[in-house]
Structure formats: C-alpha cells, structure tokens
Image: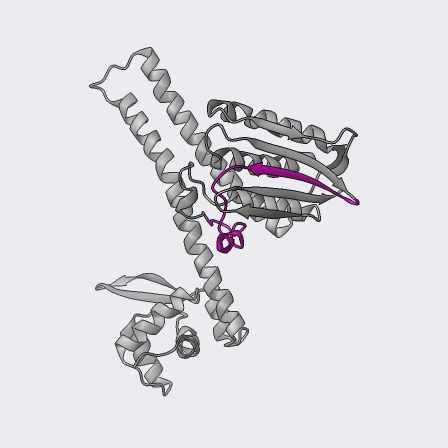
Amino acid sequence: MSRTPAVDDLLAVPMVALLDVPLDAAEAAAALSGEGLVLSAQRAGDLLAHAARLGLARIAGYTDGEARYVATSLGQRAAAGLLAADPDVRAGLEELERLRTELLATVGHELRTPLTAIRTSAGLLLDPGLAPTEAQRQQLLGTIGRSADRMQRLLAELLDLARLRSGRIEMQRTTFDARDLAREVAAAIAPMAAARDQPVQLELPDEATPVTGDRRRLEQALLNLAANAQKFSPSAAEVTLRVARDGDTVTWSVTDRGPGIAPEEQARLFERFFVGSSDRSGAAGGAGIGLPTALAIAQAHGGTIEVESTVGEGSTFHLVVPA
C-alpha cells in the first residue's frame, strides 16, 4: 500500500537525525531498529531519497554502488526540532528544492551554448593542422569574446536578482524626466526592431514628467520590458512605449502585438526561471531572469509591474513607481 507524503515527511525527520555521519540505507535501517523503529533497508532507502528531495539530506558519496546520505544544515535544524512537521513548512521545503533544481538546470542550459562555441573556436585556433587566415582568426576570436560576454551577463543577472530580492542593493536616487528614459529605451531597441521592420512608437505627455529613483535600475527594468515586446512581436508589428502621470505615480507602458499570454501563465510570469509555453517559442529563448529582475527593481522603488494580455492580440506591461 502506498504511503502519503505526510507520513514520509514525519518519518524522514527521525531518519535525518541519524545522519550526522554518512549512512547508506541498510545502515540507517539498522540504526533505526536500535531506536525501536523497525524498517526494511528498501523502506529506509525510500525515506532517505525523500529527505533529499525535501532538502533535508544529500548524497555524500557511494560505497559498493549504494548511496550514502548525510544531513544538510536544514535537516539538522529539522531534526533538532526547530522546524515542525507543518504543511506550510513542507511546502516551503519543496519549493526551495524546486527552485534549486530549476536554477541548476537553467544555468547549465544557458552556459552550454557559449561554452560549446568557446571550445570549438579555441580548438580550431589551436589545431596545428589548420592554418586559419587572419580574417578567420579574428572571427573565431570574436566568437570567443561574445560567448564569454554572454556567460558573464547571465552570472551578473543572477547576482543582481539575488541582491535585489535580499535588499542588498542601495538605490542611487536622482530626479529625472520619465519621458527621457522612454526615449533612451526606444533608441536602444530601435536597431533590433529595424532589422525586423518593426516601428517603435513613443506616446509621451507634452509636459515634463519628473520622477525620483535610480535611473540606471529603472532603465534596466524598462529595457527588459521593451526588449521582450520587440522579441515577441512578429515582423512589421508595432511596439509602443507610453509615459503617464497619475496622481502620485508615474507609469511606463510597453505594448506589443505578439501572441499574448494565457491567463494561467500570467500569474507565473515573474517567477524565477519561468519560461512561457510554446506559443511564444518562436522568439529566442531566455533564462527566465529578466522579468523577475524588473519586478524586483520596481518593488525596490515601492512600485510594481502590471500585465494586460489577450491571447492572439498582444500584451501591455506597466512599470509603475511612485513619482
């Protein structure tokens, strides 16, 4: 008879209490029997694997093909009674493990392509049997440089997001015209849009629209929204940037004519590493870091990002901050 996750959660904690030294399933079962809890080695192995999925234990190595587990710091706290067998705690542990797994998968996926390009280009340059021309050599060196830059950007984005979410980035606040920021972002995406015959339209108020905030960070957030709009819009489709003042808030809005976002996905757009479904896969993929970073910047200013989208018609993202 199958056991419920709640039962496994309760049994995993006393199991983890034994893991101050690495143990395999048979050793853990024997140790538990000494404590009056009789389990088969197979059942003990299932519980050890379950504890690892919860982040309470990890594999420390293998002996004769059998995994040996040791408690993580979180497992030690749980075993010490600092964490109760509470549904909310279990849900938090499962979410933590999911995010950790997604982080590793995302970073691995995003680094694979530039690393392959670097290794291939370096191999061609170092191959004694080849004699690349100067033009070919420069092309290969350029590939190496661009690939290294791509990896550096990914790592910088990950560190940026972590610092923003933890509040460890100090905002350098100045007062500037929100219209100027919209103009600069429109100019930044203009070359990419022109390559696909996409007009970039600006709808700005006639009067100055002052806002106080970290201009560089707000530009980073707005550029992310505008670049997404350009990327997800079809060729020859218009991208529009607007600025509006409403009472005590200033809003930059970016509208695309892309495929739109399904309602069930809109709620997940700002999750770290979330990438939308195949109806948006015609554009180049991303790591799922840009939108969470943009939202963290807005929140660091006391603002937010709002989304309006209709499948088949397009999307509008509103970056809203206190003036």
Query: What is the count of numbered marks?
Result: 0
Q: Is residue 253 magenta?
A: yes
Q: Is residue 112 magenta?
A: no
The answer to whether residue 60 of the structure is visible from this angle is: yes
The residue positioned 63% from the left and 47% from the top of the image is 305
Q: Write down the quadrant of residue 254 in the picture.
A: top right
* The N terminus lies in quadrant: bottom left
* Residue 238, horizontal then vertical, whole percent: 54, 30
Coloration mode? one colour
Of residues 267 and 309, the one drawn nearer to the viewer in this rendering: 309
* Residue 165, horizontal then vertical, whole percent: 60, 50
Q: Is residue 272 left or right of residue 251?
A: left
Residue most toward the top? Answer: 134
Residue most toward the front? Answer: 313
* The C terminus lies in quadrant: top right
Q: Report the span colored magenta.
A: 247-274
Of residues 264 and 172, the one drawn nearer to the viewer in this rendering: 264
The answer to whether 289 is drawn above or below residue 72 in the figure is above
Q: Is residue 318 left or right of residue 60?
A: right
The residue positioned 60% from the left and 24% from the top of the image is 187
The answer to whether 181 is drawn above or below residue 271 in the figure is above
The answer to whether residue 213 of the structure is visible from this angle is: no
Of residues 140 and 77, the one drawn nearer to the viewer in this rendering: 140
* Residue 228, horizontal then vertical, whole percent: 52, 37
The residue positioned 55% from the left and 73% from the top of the image is 82
* Residue 44, horizontal then vertical, whole percent: 31, 76
The answer to whether 305 is drawn above or below residue 145 in the figure is below
Q: Write down the quadrant of residue 282 in the picture.
A: top left
